[in-house]
Image (cartoon, rainbow, N blue to C red):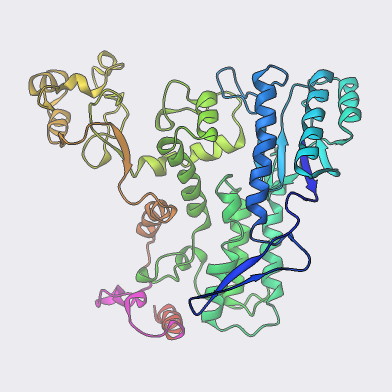
Amino acid sequence: MTVGYTGCVCVESVDYSVLVNGEQVGPIIPGRGLRQGDPLSPYLFIICAEGLSSLIRDAESRGALTGMKVCRHAPSVSHLLFADDCFLFFKANEDQAHVMKNILATYELASGQAISLPKSEIYCSRNVPDGIKTIITNILGVQAVLGTGKYLGLPSMIGRDRKATFAYIKDRVWQKINSWSGKCLSKAGREVMIKSVLQAIPAYVMSIFQLPHTLIDSIEKMLNSFWWGHGKTTQRGIHWMNWEKLSAPKIHGGMGFKDLSAFNLALLGKQGWKFITEPNTLVARIFKARYFPSGSYLTATVGHNPSYVWRSIMRARFVVCGGAWWTIGSGASISILNEPWLTNGEFISSDVPGAHFIHNFTINSLMNLYDKSWNKQVVRQVFSADIASKILHTLLISQVGEDRIVWKGNGTDAILYAVLTDCVSQSLSIRLTYGARGTGRGSGTLKFHRRLRIYSGACAVVVY
């Protein structure tokens, strides 16, 4: 159930004091009281929403309400709060509908906020009979819907036709391009427009879902037409370079535009990285209970009947594996096989000879625990010469007391994107740089104005 609110009379008056040249001026008393855009409003709403959260938790602890679980051992979720909207979850029966209605009525009396029924909706699973749906909607006074559509800018239901589901992103990019169709933008202006505005439009959605390749190709073609054309997608112009080369770094002769497919995987990889580094968050606990209850994100499988969000995050796992590795403390929580604990993040595959003998062992079984060193005799007996050499050359630091997985860089999406773009740039067979014929320098390293650098890059395209 989604709920909206109208009105707030918790505070009827407010005054401000400001600093002018280091001196306090005020109080300034607004004539209309506390308004929606007041800086104090978010804090007051959080205080009020905490009261609603406490009422729901109390009812859940007494057994009057039953939260939702995605699987047997997953944490129960009874409510999710997003600014002035909230999701409420309870079992579809008449008793719990009355309990929820009484909680909302109590909250209205205590906070002064009223539930906006026209903005509120209820969604039931397919297993709920139509009669129960009708009873619940009549009790709560809200309308039943087949789905919540888009919520917080994201589609709540992903069907088979994913291109149609995410088509609104392409429409937004197209509208933004055509809103500038009559403007006279220089090449430098178009570069800023593409990097700061157009490529930022799908970023929020790409952090949760993997967009279809056909959709990404369509968006990149629109950006390419905007770059080489005259501001409209219908005025193509001459495309001197394809998007693959334009998205290469400037030092390699490109324009530094984002490869949207690689950037999509980088953002999804960051979500997977949070599963590892922030395991106590609600979303990490839910995904762990559903998809990898006895393992980690790095060793998880797609599983049976997975959600599209999980499929998307799993497709970016190779990005995380390319930059994550363990710092060895006690070694008790790091499996010997399929974990990146060797030097430079390498791992021992479960396909090596004799792997079934050490399948359930952790690396502390290969260590001398009294002085935190490798047990050379055991290592050389169990593994082949090359693997044993890698293990013995892996550094053990006595000051590190806890096993912890870390990132080779700083863990930002820029570093994750760099892991992918390095592979892309290395695969390009043509380097459109000034160094391609002996100087060893690209246009991105030359120190002159952005506009001149763009035109010099265009000249490089013509020459080569």
Q: Position of residue 116 (x, y in %)?
A: 84, 44
Q: Say if residue 105 shows up in the picture.
A: yes
- Give me the residue at 66% from left, 25% from top: 58
The residues colored magenta run 432-451
Residue 85's place in the image compared with 16, above or below, is: above
Q: Position of residue 396 (x, y in %)?
A: 15, 34
Residue 300's place in the image compared with 14, above or below, is: above
User: Closest to the observer: 244 or 43?
Assistant: 43
Q: Specify the quadrant of the image occupied by residue 386.
A: top left
297 relative position to 80: left or right? left
- Give me the residue at 82% from left, 18% from top: 95
Residue 444 lies in magenta, yes or no?
yes
Residue 439's place in the image compared with 275, above or below, is: below
**Residue lying farthest to the left in this orientation:** 377
User: Closest to the observer: 9 or 73?
Assistant: 9
12 relative position to 198: left or right? right
Q: Position of residue 340 (x, y in %)?
A: 29, 35
Please give the count of numbered marks on the rendered protein.
0
Residue 157's place in the image compared with 360, above or below, is: below
285 relative position to 122: left or right? left
Q: Where is residue 303 in the image (x, y as percent from the top left)?
A: 53, 25
- Give me the residue at 54% from left, 33% from top: 282
Q: Say if residue 67 shows up in the picture.
A: no
Look at the image and tell me in which quarter the C terminus lies.
bottom left
Residue 448 lies in magenta, yes or no?
yes
Q: Specify the quadrant of the image occupied by residue 227.
A: bottom right
Look at the image and tell me in which quarter the N terminus lies.
top right
280 relative position to 190: left or right? left
